[in-house]
Amino acid sequence: MCFFCNMAITKKDEGGFNTLHPFFFSNQTRILVTGFRSVSREAMRVARAKAEERRAMAIALEQEMKAKAQEMKAKVIEAEVKVPLAIAEAFRSGNLGVMDFMRYKNIMADTSMRDSIAGEDIKGEK
């Protein structure tokens, strides 16, 4: 609190920005602020409008990124469905033997164990 006028040293103005008490400005700054108050208010309105526009663009971009991440997760799930079919086809065509399949299952078990030690569940989510 200011000793002279009981005003808070910093306070939030109507835009939510922290503003300093006028006592902390120099005399030249005080003259400029009072002389160009209407200009500065208009400049602040423009600045706030631009900031709001940037904020809206950031939110839109965030939503787009969430949608892309969801789309990529769907593609991964779709690819994971094809793995057993490819293994079955490799067995039928003779390109995959029993020992190769057992080695594959061992690698999958090791990966699952490491994920559980790291604190992730099987789907990769914490």
Image (tube, grey):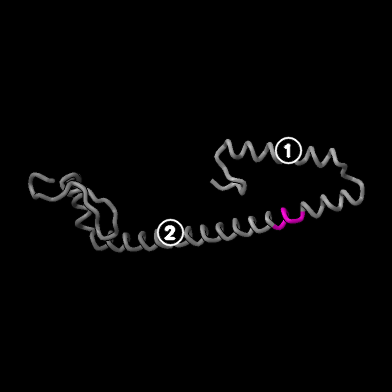
Residue type at mark 2 is Arg
Q: For mark 2, does the 10 Å Cα neighbourhood hold few (<14), some (14 to 19), or many (20 or more) residues? A: few
| Front residue of 110 and 16 | 110
* Residue 38 position by quadrant: bottom left
What residue do we see at 63% from left, 59% from top? 71
* Residue 54 position by quadrant: bottom left
| SS class, disc 1 | helix
Region of the chain picked out in magenta, as a range: 78-82
| Residue 51 location (% of width, % of height) | 40, 58
Q: Is residue 116 magenta?
A: no
| Front residue of 108 and 10 | 108
Q: Which residue is mark 2?
A: 55
| Residue 84 location (% of width, % of height) | 78, 52
What residue do we see at 59% from left, 56% from top? 69
Vertical side of 25 occupied by 56: above or below: below
Specify whether 16 is left or right of 72.
left
What residue do we see at 84% from left, 52% from top? 88
Q: Which is the main secondary structure of the residues drawn in magenta?
A: helix
| Front residue of 37 and 71 | 71
Residue type at mark 1 is Ile
Q: Earlier in the sequence, mark 2 or mark 1?
A: 2
Specify whether 25 is left or right of 120.
left
Q: Which residue is mark 1?
A: 107
Q: For mark 1, does the 10 Å Cα neighbourhood hold few (<14), some (14 to 19), or many (20 or more) residues? A: few
